[in-house]
Image (tube, helix red, strand yellow):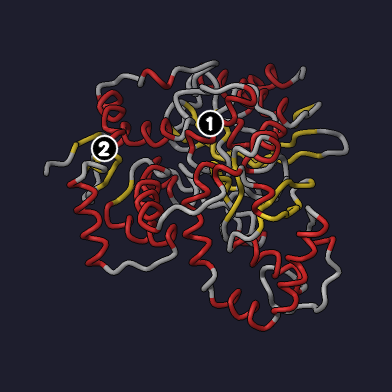
Amino acid sequence: MNDFPISKITARRFIMGKQGLWPGRRFSGVEGTAAALHQMDAVQLDPLNVIARSQDIAMLGRVLDYRPEHLYQVAYEERGFFDYGGVLFLYPMSELPYWRLHMKRAKDWKRLKAFREEHPETMKEVLAALRINGPMGNKDFKGNKKLINSYRGGKDTSVALYSLWITGKVMITRRDGFTRVYDLTERVAPPKLDYAATEQEAEDFFARKSISFLGLMKEKRWRTVFSNYIQRKLDVEEADARIAALYEEKVISPVSIEGSKERWIVLDRDLPLLEELDAGRIPSGWQMLGPSTQDEVTFVAPLEIVSARKRANQVFDFEYIWEVYKPLVQRRWGYYVLPILYGDDLVARLDPKLDRKTMTLHIKGFWLEDDAPVSDPNFADALGKGLARFAKFVEAKTVDIDAIKPKKLQNHLQKFVGDL
């Protein structure tokens, strides 16, 4: 079986395009928000709101007129998506029957299993309260016992709620701010989706989703990612057999990427996209509704799948570590630094913070990559437009760009943000 050879630029464009992040925003409004989420497969959720939450920054990079209420509407009002997992993601509700397998196997997580065995009455109490009272959050339970060294809550009822949620007994029905409000699964999930797929159906689904979410994946990494999805360890022999079957059934195809010695895999159905991109064309389904990333930069969310967890270095040759949880003395860049996408490359980063008393957007730090086209007026215009869009999104009244250097670039950007 011959590998399909592609350039590194093709790989990069494919990974971003599959995620709806390139060549520009192709979605709009509430319906577009739902369509973008389906295109992405999932978006990671995070409570931090230094300037905007990571998930909202991610959606802003895809939806032309995005507002945070769009995400709330499609998830909690229209029930199109559900949030789940030890690492919290928002998934299409249509996937719920497959996630039942993960939920079933999560019952064996050692710490939660031990908690349930030690606190059976608390488990019964919390479930009964939800059944009688309807939607409830952590604050609605007084708790019977304070817990020490529990990552999932400071009182027994909090951990009980988490256990019920991770094992599928309850779901998040809405959020108050970012605070979870739970209810029984049968009262949250649409009836047609409130069932469990068979084990084989679920494992087959996650075999594909493991690749789909990343777009391109190193073949040798598939076993680990797939195992995490299905909550079951695979030995090398089983993994090799499953990979061979996926090739045989033409579910996946092998890919070689310029400069990489490893074999990569892609879903077979996505090969036409790679062929179009490798020929220098933009796939027909990727038409933009607004400016391209070449015309207007995009600020990339800190938990964006194309760049988070060391993927920025792999895809863009761009060093990026989210330093929000690092002590101040260990930070190289800043607290909430965002990469800047220009065209098909990450060329800079900035550290924004919103002063909500004065509604001033402060750019606390700004760093250009060595190969950034700083002298190109087109880049300066694209940066100015992207900064203005971002400032309007966070409803800033003024923008402080004194930290941006060189001075000539700062003066140029002032034309775009001086009169919001």
| Residue 77 falls in image quadrant | top right
Q: Which x, y percent locates residue 328?
A: 67, 59
- Residue occupying the far bottom of the picture: 118
Inspect the image, locate mark 2, and give the three-letter code of the amino acid beneath it.
Asp
Q: Which x, y percent locates residue 205?
A: 38, 48
Q: In terms of sequence position, does the residue under pointer 1 or pointer 2 come before the other?
A: 1
Inspect the image, locate mark 1, and give the three-letter code of the amino acid beneath it.
Ala
Crowding at label 2, few (<14), some or many (≥20) Cα neighbours within 10 Å? some
Q: Which mark is residue 388?
A: none
Q: Which x, y percent locates residue 127?
A: 73, 65
The answer to whether residue 289 shows anywhere in this view is: yes
Q: Nearer the viewer, residue 191 or 26?
A: 191
Q: What residue is rendered at 26% in x and 37% in y?
A: 268
Secondary structure beneath disc 1? helix
| Residue of label 1 | 36
Above or below residue 103? Residue 364 is: above
Secondary structure beneath disc 2? helix
| Residue 140 falls in image quadrant | bottom right
Q: Which mark is residue 268?
A: 2
- Residue occupying the far left of the picture: 1
CB contact under 8 Å: marks 1 and 2: no
Does 234 sit left or right of 399 as displayed?
left
| Residue 388 falls in image quadrant | top right
